[in-house]
Image (cartoon, rainbow, N blue to C red):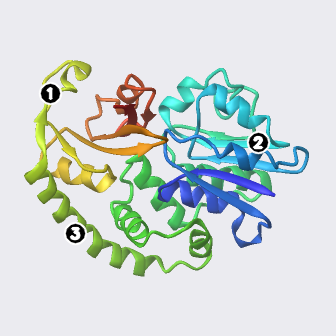
Amino acid sequence: MKYIIHHGDADGRCAAALAAEGAKAPDVKYYELQYGEEPPWNEFMLFEEERDEMWLVDFSFSEPLMQKLRGYCGEFYWIDHHYTALRDLIYFDIGGDDGYKGLPGLRRLGTGACKLTWQFLQSHSGCLGAAPKFVEYISDYDVGRNQWPESKYLVTYLADMAFEVEEYQIMLDTSDLDFMLKEGRKMYRTNLSRYRRILAQYGYKTTRFDVFAKRPLKSISVNYPGNGHVGRAGKEMGYQIVHCYNDFMRGGALIRKHHVYTDDPDINLGVFAAMHGGGGGHRGAAGWEEIL
């Protein structure tokens, strides 16, 4: 049995589909989590330690939770690319390109988790072929490299259609990329127009990031669930930082979730998020939670 914990976005779902080795992988169970959520410990009590595999892709937990999770199964694989996770878990016996001996998997900044998963599996199969464009585009968008500007259309299509991991498995083998890019372009334009209106109507200027950046910034905050398209809309409106937040209940507590986005190369939002409630993420996109 393979148990795969992954982040709930295109990069995480694609990485999970690859970790399952497509449709050929038997007995796979997926757990899609958002940052701040804990593993479903009750389900893991049924692990057969010598037989079961745990894959953690595009995701991490605090070091105590990582240690606890590692003890539940026979094999543990960790693939991640988030700046704060790699920094904070430096002593969690990590491996990868940094030369440390440690957990199987691959950890590297600047490459999406789906492409890292592809590279890890390829290296172990002895077939070092290029990643499919489907994987390359998702990775490109997730880390903000913009090597392929059309990658945003693919991710828009995947997000708006709300595909599950099992559907990503099918698309890895049979995807009509041209069709998805065409449809995604229409969706992207519609979304961008809607988010611009939301920011213009409900957004307000904020200075909360100026001290961190050590200079005045043109920033906007809006009480709206964060996603990359809201961030893109704000950046195209000329804002250096776009800050989204929304409130929800979890376990009887009122939680406020924050997402922040920037294209400014001198600002590392992953560091900013880590300073606020133990959040994290990338240089250009990050998040954190607080209990109200």
**Disc 3 versus disc 2: nearer the observer:** 2
Dot 3 lies on which element?
A: helix
**Mark 3 to mark 1: distance in Å?**
29 Å
**Mark 3 to mark 2: distance in Å?**
41 Å
Residue under the image location 30 percent in, 29 percent down: 267
Which amino acid, mark 2?
Phe
Crowdedness near tag 3: few (<14), some (14–19) or many (≥20) residues, C-alpha within 10 Å: few
Of mark 3 and mark 1, the one earlier in the sequence is 3
Q: How many marks?
A: 3
Residue under the image location 37 percent in, 25 percent down: 276
Whether residue 218 can be seen here:
no
Give the residue pinned by disc 1.
207
Which amino acid, mark 3?
Arg
Check residue 166 in the rendering and tell me which mark sits there, or answer none: none
- Is residue 24 depicted above or below 74 in this figure? below
Which amino acid, mark 1?
Thr
Of mark 1 and mark 2, the one earlier in the sequence is 2
In this view, the residue farthest toward the right is: 50
Crowdedness near tag 2: few (<14), some (14–19) or many (≥20) residues, C-alpha within 10 Å: some
Q: Position of residue 126 (x, y in %)?
A: 79, 56
Check residue 189 in the rendering and tell me which mark sits there, or answer none: 3
Crowdedness near tag 1: few (<14), some (14–19) or many (≥20) residues, C-alpha within 10 Å: some
Of mark 3 and mark 2, the one earlier in the sequence is 2
Q: Position of residue 95 (x, y in %)?
A: 70, 31
Give the residue pinned by disc 2.
76
